[in-house]
Image (cartoon, rainbow, N blue to C red):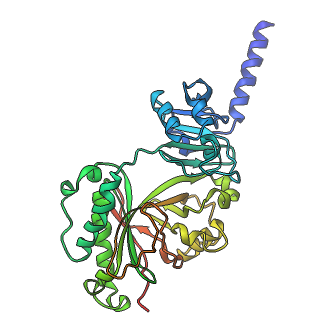
Amino acid sequence: MTFVLVAVGLLGWALFEALRPAAPPALASWERVAFVAKPPGSLPWTAAAEVPALPEALAGTDAQAAVDALEAAGLEGLWLPTTPNAPWGPSQTVAERISAGGVIPGLRGVYLAPEGTLYAIDATFWPRDLASTALARAARQILEGGDPPPLDAYPGGLSARQSVEVLILLRAPDGPRLWRSARAESIAEGLNVAALAARRRWDERLETMGGPLHETLDQLDVEVALLFDDGTIDPDAVSLIDPLFKPVHGVAYDQPTRWRYLLPKVTHAGRGATEAYRSLFVDNGFADESFDRADLRLYRLRMETVSVDQGSAGSRRAGAASGSDEAPSSSSSESASKEGSGSSAGSNTTNVVPKP
């Protein structure tokens, strides 16, 4: 009889495990995660309540305290229940801001699903004071026709090895004229590649742009920004796209050989992020309801301006500090595609705004 009961119990457990929804493949490689919400599938994550100092940090407003608690425990991520319509301002607790899909210093979104949200420690580093003065000046020198500086000539941590995407934007008093971005293995490399790509693109469109770049560049602001992947959208979370995409987020997708996006100001200039995705799909030859395409990974793009070198026309809006979202306000032509693959830097192909 005992044997029968044990066999029935084992059969029931096996049936339960077989019917239990599997964890999304995108989460399979994440092992060092503390959870508040129930983990998806059978992921062997650690209960947040068991991590020293973490419950107190999540209940407070100091995000660095949560990062410190995770690092002290050898963990890298947090899984919390998703509440996308909840407030996410600095007065909310760290847990509330993560659940709402907000922006939190030291953390970045990784995966956003109806049942839970994964945030992880963001190790992206740059010396902010140095970057704010050096990067845009270096970009302007390349745009003027100079050779890109050797990577080891960049000061501080700008040539440190890390995966980044760097955006170069040329802005006139009436708005952006041209922008290019590049994914690379350091900020210095990304800046060099993006600036060269912007210079080539201007040369390719001389008539449209109103003449050679060297005749106009002095009147343009040169802006350098970092673009961050702030969380993959779970296929079942499409209905939550609008509340999950905050004003600082642009819509974006990856394919195996390219990526495309709209910067934040364009994303939110119309009827929300869902409609922005539909426009992005159509502009790139897809059906407007391509949210469930197997070859697309939808994600949130966050932009942070890190350096500005003003032109003689003083086109940058007064009071817009470095680090603010100064995304272009033009049409959905701000999409970008990657050419090539692998670990080498890939520049994005973007449209330009013709000279009136």
Residue 344 visible in the shown view:
no
- Image point (57%, 34%), residue name: 57
In this view, which residue lies farthest toward the right?
1
In this view, which residue lies farthest toward the front?
319
State the image coordinates of residue 96 (x, y, percent, origin top left): 65, 44
Q: Quadrant of the C terminus?
A: bottom left
Q: Judge whether 243 appears above or below 1 on screen.
A: below
Q: Judge whether 43 appears above or below 218 on screen.
A: above
Q: Judge whether 83 appears above or below 200 on screen.
A: above
Q: Judge whether 111 appears above or below 204 on screen.
A: above
Between 312 and 49, the residue placed more toward the observer is: 312
- Image point (70%, 51%), residue name: 86
Between 349 and 51, the residue placed more toward the observer is: 51
- Image point (44%, 60%), residue name: 323
Q: Quadrant of the N terminus?
A: top right
Q: Quadrant of residue 154?
A: bottom left
